[in-house]
Amino acid sequence: MKATLVFWHKDRRQDGVILELKIHEVAVSTQYPDGLKYRLICKNLASGKLVLMDNHHPKGHHVHLDDSESIYLFRGLDALMDDFTALVHGHLGVKI
């Protein structure tokens, strides 16, 4: 199965924030047991502050806050989007 784009949004806002959300449906495998591959990023160009959530192999689900990285407990797409929105608001002070 090829990756199927499920959702994509990219925006460069006037306040200097870049937002890109990309979610693909992929074949269920040991690398992607949830059948999803995603990359959600929000960066403030002025401050350099960053929120990035992704699940590439071999790391699996994880989140980057600037230079820090931690494991992310994936609980479905709705929770992923809610968690990303909360992190962006809390870490960057930006509402998306």
Image: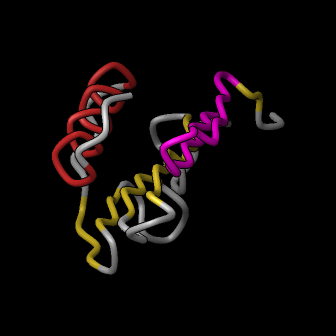
Quarter of the figure with the C terminus: top left
Q: In which image quadrant can residue 68 be found?
A: bottom left
Q: In which image quadrant can residue 47 be found?
A: bottom left
Residue drawn at point x = 55 percent, y = 36 percent: 36
Q: In which image quadrant can residue 10 be found?
A: top right
Magenta portion: prevailing SS class = strand
Q: Is residue 60 left or right of residue 65?
A: right
In the figure, 20 relative to 41: above or below? Answer: above
Q: Let me know if residue 18 is in the magenta part.
A: yes
In the figure, 92 relative to 47: above or below? Answer: above
* Between 71 and 81, the one nearer to me in the picture: 81
* Between 92 and 56, the one nearer to me in the picture: 92
Residue 80: x percent and y percent? 33, 32
Residue 33: x percent and y percent? 47, 43
* Between 42 and 3, the one nearer to me in the picture: 42
- The extreme bottom residue here reads 67
Quarter of the figure with the N terminus: top right
In the figure, 79 relative to 2: above or below? Answer: above
Residue drawn at point x = 57 percent, y = 38 percent: 13
What segment carries the magenta color?
6-24
Q: Is residue 31 left or right of residue 73?
A: right
Residue 32: x percent and y percent? 53, 47
